[in-house]
């Protein structure tokens, strides 16, 4: 086939079709070259092959053509220009060796290359290097272009997160989905499990992002982990590691988002316990071993008369690192929590201690009278801070857009280098200032969230304290979670007693009202301590395994 010109055509983007190198144009130029040479022609059309994938695996037509070259069936090859074959250095070398070994002449718009001629080989190698360099520059500009578009608020992350839709490639709230996202967060904040939330979504016929009728627990957890619902997210360039802060319409407040994240962290500590137990435990979700820090477990076995809270550390170590059967000392190693606590007795002690502290709290009583005014103050301050946060986000978007435009101008080399550096510094300083103001605003909203927690706690205290005597076990559990952060349990080997440190969310322990010097003064409530200490002594009548 020495009288045939093999014509290889490829385009890598729509831009190349616009600058005169479309497939039809390449084929026409190849045919004209074959006519000049008096050759027949054969078209090898790769079609659209992205320049992102320059290796042979992504070029099936080029692979077949090279097989023909290796079989000695190709003597003359035409391409529009050198980079039509490849801009990848390894692929270029593979092609060059194949053409040189089989004495194939290469025809391009730059001339004819006989790769067995040292001069032509040198020129081909230089052109390959230029093509590779040009490809690197194109890739870098494309990457910078993506970052600039992100700075301008465009979404480049594939399908939008649940709760949002795309308009002009920017995130907007989906009016239906966003309501369900808000419900999911509120349900979870009210201590609902992800399994319970899944059931509500399935029963309500809510479709997933992939239009499925059944939700997975992972999809719900993904929504709860996403930062988008609170109005922000980040985009990180995989090559440079540069991260851009982005903003989108918020579905929930940052206060609610923070509350949900804290609940998820606590549940993560108790992974494997949530949603699996068939027994009721009043305190298990709050209790931690003070010696090893692991969550306390619970065990109720009616047939053995067992009901106990115990440290799971040694049990988990046994599963992950089983001891040698001859090591009889293993059971005495590890955590110092060598005895368990009786459940019913421990529940009664903690419940009695908590109710006593709440009943005697001067702060709760005083602030209950001021609750209405405090709530009004909270609402007004929160609205002002939310307006400020929106204004700052708009200001940040403006700065990011300006930075994106600056980068575009800089890439086009349309600005003096000295001026460019000064402008860049000014923009980055301005960006830093706006971000600092946003951080301060977020801190204020978190402080307001703490104030709101006080208001809600006082409201529950005021309405429910009179009814605590009639509470069900589940109501007691939810009531304790309002006020108690955690309970650390320690074992004293000398006295065989357990010490329980109850950490409250508010400083209610031993608080009091300071009357002041003037008898006419109403006095001010003085915060107390966060921790209450109680001792659970060993019961002589209780089997050793239960106490």
Image (spheres, helix red, strand yellow):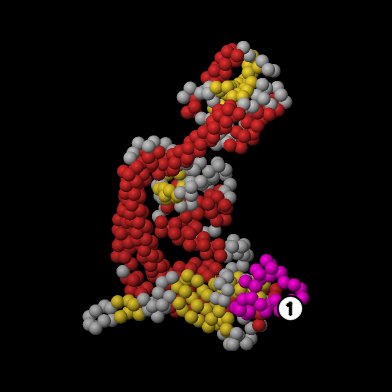
- Quadrant containing the N terminus in the rendered view: top right
Q: Is residue 327 above or below residue 47?
A: below
Indicate the position of residue 218 as horizontal and vertical percent values.
Answer: 57, 52
Residue found farthest to the right: 326
Which residue is pictured at 37% across the width and 61% down the height?
443
Indicate the position of residue 210 as horizontal and vertical percent values.
Answer: 55, 42
Q: Is residue 348 magenta?
A: no
Q: Is residue 300 above or below residue 255?
A: below
Given residues 441 and 190, the one toward you in this image is 441
Q: Which residues are magenta?
A: 313-342
Indicate the position of residue 315 as horizontal and vertical percent values.
Answer: 66, 71
- Quadrant containing the C terminus in the rendered view: bottom right
> How many tags in the picture?
1
Question: At numbered mark 1, what does the secondary structure look like: helix, strand or loop?
Answer: loop
Q: Is residue 316 magenta?
A: yes
Lateral position of residue 37 relative to residue 231, left or right: right
Given residues 423 and 288, the one toward you in this image is 423
Q: Is residue 117 above or below residue 133?
A: above
Indicate the position of residue 543 as horizontal and vertical percent values.
Answer: 66, 82
Lateral position of residue 325 relative to residue 299, left or right: right
Q: Can see residue 23?
A: no
Q: Can see residue 278?
A: yes
**Residue receiving disc 1:** 328
Which residue is pictured at 55% across the width and 29% down the height?
123
Residue found farthest to the front: 118
Q: Residues within 10 Å of mark 1 (few under 14, many from 20)?
A: few
Which residue is pictured at 57% across the width and 44% down the height?
213
Which residue is pictured at 58% across the width and 47% down the height?
214
């Amino acid at each position: 086939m020495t009288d045939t010109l093999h014509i290889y055509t490829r385009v890598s983007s729509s831009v190349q079709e616009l600058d005169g190198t479309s497939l039809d144009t390449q084929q026409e130029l190849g045919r004209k070259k074959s006519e000049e040479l008096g050759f027949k022609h054969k078209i090898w059309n790769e079609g659209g092959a992205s320049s992102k994938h320059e290796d042979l695996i992504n070029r099936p037509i080029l692979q077949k053509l090279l097989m023909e070259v290796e079989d000695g069936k190709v003597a003359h090859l035409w391409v529009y220009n050198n980079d039509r074959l490849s801009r990848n250095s390894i692929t270029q070398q593979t092609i060059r060796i194949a053409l040189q070994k089989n004495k194939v002449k290469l025809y391009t718009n730059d001339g004819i290359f006989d790769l067995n001629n040292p001069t032509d080989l040198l020129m081909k190698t230089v052109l390959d290097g230029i093509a590779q360099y040009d490809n690197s520059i194109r890739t870098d500009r494309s990457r910078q272009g993506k970052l600039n578009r992100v700075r301008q608020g465009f979404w480049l992350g594939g399908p939008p997160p649940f709760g949002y839709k795309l308009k002009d490639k920017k995130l907007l709230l989906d009016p239906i989905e966003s309501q369900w996202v808000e419900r999911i967060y509120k349900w979870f904040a009210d201590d609902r499990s992800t399994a319970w939330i899944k059931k509500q979504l399935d029963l309500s016929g809510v479709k997933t992002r992939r239009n499925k009728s059944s939700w997975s627990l992972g999809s719900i957890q993904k929504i709860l982990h996403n930062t988008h619902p609170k109005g922000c997210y980040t985009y990180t360039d995989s090559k440079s590691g540069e991260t851009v802060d982005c903003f989108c319409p918020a579905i929930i407040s940052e206060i609610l988002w923070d509350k949900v994240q804290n609940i998820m962290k606590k549940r993560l500590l108790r992974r494997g316990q949530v949603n699996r137990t068939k027994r009721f435990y009043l305190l298990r979700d709050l209790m931690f071993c003070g010696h090893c820090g692991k969550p306390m477990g619970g065990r109720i076995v009616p047939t053995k008369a067992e009901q106990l809270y115990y440290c799971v550390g040694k049990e988990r170590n046994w599963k992950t690192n089983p001891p040698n059967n001859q090591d009889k000392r293993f059971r005495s190693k590890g955590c110092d929590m060598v005895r368990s606590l009786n459940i019913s007795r421990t529940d009664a002690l903690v419940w009695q201690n908590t109710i006593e502290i709440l009943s005697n709290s001067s702060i709760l009583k005083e602030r209950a009278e001021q609750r209405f005014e405090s709530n009004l103050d909270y609402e007004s301050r929160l609205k002002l801070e939310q307006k400020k946060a929106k204004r700052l986000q708009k200001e940040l978007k403006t700065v990011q857009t300006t930075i994106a435009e600056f980068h575009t101008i800089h890439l086009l080399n349309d600005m003096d280098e000295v001026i460019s550096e000064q402008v860049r510094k000014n923009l980055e300083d301005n960006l830093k200032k706006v971000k600092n103001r946003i951080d301060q605003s977020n801190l204020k909203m978190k402080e307001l969230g703490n104030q709101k927690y006080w208001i809600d706690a006082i409201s529950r205290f005021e309405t429910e304290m009179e009814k605590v005597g009639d509470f069900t076990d589940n109501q007691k559990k939810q009531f304790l979670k309002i006020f108690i952060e955690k309970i650390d349990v320690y074992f004293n080997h000398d006295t065989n007693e357990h010490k329980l440190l109850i950490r409250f969310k508010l400083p209610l322990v031993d608080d009091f009202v300071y009357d002041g010097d003037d008898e006419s003064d109403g006095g001010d409530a003085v915060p107390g301590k966060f921790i209450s200490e109680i001792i659970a002594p060993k019961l002589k009548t209780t089997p050793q395994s239960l106490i």
